[in-house]
C-alpha cells in the first residue's frame, strides 16, 4: 500500500500543471450534481436557484490555452446537466440524474466473479455482475424486448441516460425497427439468444444455434455482431461460454440487482448498490408488471440517484 501511495504522489507532482487539478475539481463538481442547479452562467437556463458549484472557476484571472479549453468543456457539461434537469422535471423524476464521469481511456481488466467459474475457463469470456471501478457509477441493462414503448426512447434520450439492450429474437422479431431506433440513439444491441431457452439443458449444438444464430440475426438487422452476451435467467455451463466465444462474444455481464416499477431485488447480502454494479431490468409493459417503462425508470433512477450514483455506459467499460 505504502509503495502505491508514494507512486501516486510522485505521479501527481509530475502532472501538477494546475490544469489537471482544475479538471479534477470540475469533474467533482459535475459528478456531485452541483452544476445541475446553477442554471449556467448567464445562459438563461431554466430552473433552480443560482447557487455556485464548489470548485467552479468563476472570477479567476483571464486564462489562456488549456485553461480556456477547460472552461468551454465545463460550460458544455453545465449546459448538458441543465437540460437534464429540465427533462427530469418533465418526466416526473424525483431528482435530476447525476452526470457520469468521463469514461476511462483504457477499459478495466474484467475477470470471472468468484463462484461463477466453469471448469477450465482460462480464455473463456468472463462472467461478472459488477465492473471493477472506484467511480460511483452503475450500468443499466434491459433484457428480452417484448415491450416496445416509444415513450422509453424519448425519455432516455431527453434524460441522456445510457443503457444497454440484450435482445431475444422471439420477442423482437415483430418489430426490429423499434430497436433500430434505439440503436440510432446510441444504445448498443447485445445478444440474449434466439428463443430464451434454459441453456444448461441444451446440447452443444442447440446452444450454438441459440447463441450464434442470434449473433447473425443482430448483425443482419443492426449491422454489428455483438461482443456482449447474457444467458437467459443467468444460467450457463461451460458449453455456453465455449460456444459464445466461438462466435465473437468477449464478455458475459450478468447483474447484481434487478429493477421493477415498484421495487428492487438485490443479489448482494447488503441489499445495496456498489461502484460498477450492473442493474438488470426488462422491456415489459403494464400487462407484465405494475407500471409502464417510464414508471420503472422513475423508480430505479430514484434509487440510483438517492444513493449518489450516476448511470454510465456499459460498453465504455466492457
Ligand atoms: Zn431474459
Image: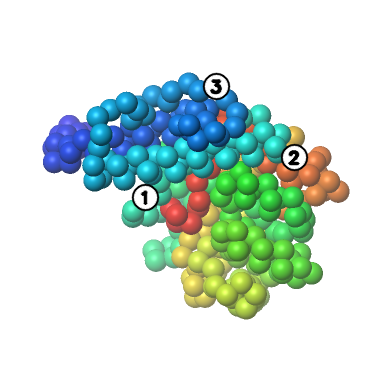
Tell me the distance, in whole angstroms, between the alpha carbons under discs 1 and 2. 31 Å
Residue nearest the viewer, comparing 226 with 240: 226
Q: Is residue 138 visible?
A: no
Q: Which residue is mark 3?
A: 49
Q: Which mark is residue 295?
A: 2
- Foreground mark, 2 or 3? 3
Q: Is residue 156 visible?
A: yes
Q: Which residue is mark 1?
A: 104
Is residue 173 left or right of 101 when viewed as pictured? right
For the image, the number of numbered tags is 3
Residue nearest the viewer, comparing 307 with 117: 307
- Dot 1: within a 10 Å radius of its alpha carbon, few (fewer than 14), some, or many (20 or more) residues? few
Helix, strand or loop status at disc 3: loop
Measured as percent of width and height from the top left, residue 33 is found at 49, 31
- Quadrant location of the C terminus? bottom left
Mark 2 or mark 3: whose residue is earlier in sequence: 3
Amino acid at each position: 500500500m505504502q509503495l502505491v501511495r508514494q507512486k501516486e504522489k510522485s505521479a501527481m507532482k509530475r502532472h501538477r500543471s494546475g490544469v489537471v487539478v482544475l479538471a479534477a475539481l470540475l469533474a467533482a463538481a459535475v459528478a456531485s450534481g452541483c452544476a445541475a442547479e446553477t442554471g449556467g452562467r448567464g445562459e438563461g437556463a431554466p430552473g433552480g436557484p443560482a447557487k455556485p458549484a464548489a470548485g467552479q472557476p468563476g472570477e479567476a484571472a483571464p486564462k489562456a490555452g488549456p485553461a480556456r479549453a477547460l472552461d468551454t468543456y465545463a460550460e458544455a457539461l453545465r449546459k448538458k446537466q441543465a437540460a437534464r434537469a429540465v427533462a427530469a422535471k418533465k418526466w416526473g423524476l424525483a431528482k435530476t440524474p447525476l452526470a457520469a464521469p468521463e469514461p476511462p481511456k483504457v477499459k478495466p481488466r474484467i475477470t470471472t466473479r468468484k463462484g461463477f467459474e466453469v471448469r477450465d475457463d482460462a480464455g473463456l469470456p468472463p462472467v461478472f455482475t459488477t465492473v471493477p471501478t472506484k467511480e460511483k457509477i452503475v450500468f443499466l441493462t434491459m433484457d428480452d424486448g417484448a415491450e416496445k414503448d416509444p415513450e422509453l426512447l424519448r425519455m432516455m434520450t431527453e434524460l441522456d441516460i445510457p443503457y444497454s439492450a440484450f435482445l431475444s429474437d422471439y420477442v423482437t422479431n415483430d418489430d426490429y425497427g423499434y430497436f433500430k431506433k434505439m440503436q440510432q440513439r446510441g444504445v448498443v444491441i447485445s445478444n440474449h439468444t434466439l428463443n430464451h431457452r434454459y441453456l444448461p439443458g441444451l446440447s452443444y449444438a442447440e446452444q450454438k444455434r441459440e447463441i450464434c444464430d442470434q449473433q447473425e440475426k443482430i448483425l443482419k438487422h443492426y449491422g454489428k455482431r455483438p461482443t456482449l452476451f447474457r444467458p437467459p435467467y443467468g444460467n450457463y455451463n461451460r458449453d455456453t461460454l465455449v460456444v459464445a466465444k466461438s462466435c465473437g462474444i468477449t464478455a458475459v455481464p450478468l447483474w447484481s440487482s434487478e429493477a421493477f416499477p415498484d421495487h428492487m431485488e438485490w443479489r448482494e447480502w447488503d441489499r445495496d448498490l456498489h461502484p460498477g454494479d450492473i442493474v438488470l431490468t426488462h422491456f415489459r409493459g403494464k400487462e407484465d408488471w405494475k407500471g409502464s417503462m417510464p414508471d420503472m425508470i422513475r423508480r430505479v433512477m430514484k434509487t440510483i440517484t438517492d444513493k449518489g450514483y450516476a448511470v454510465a455506459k456499459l460498453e465504455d467499460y466492457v
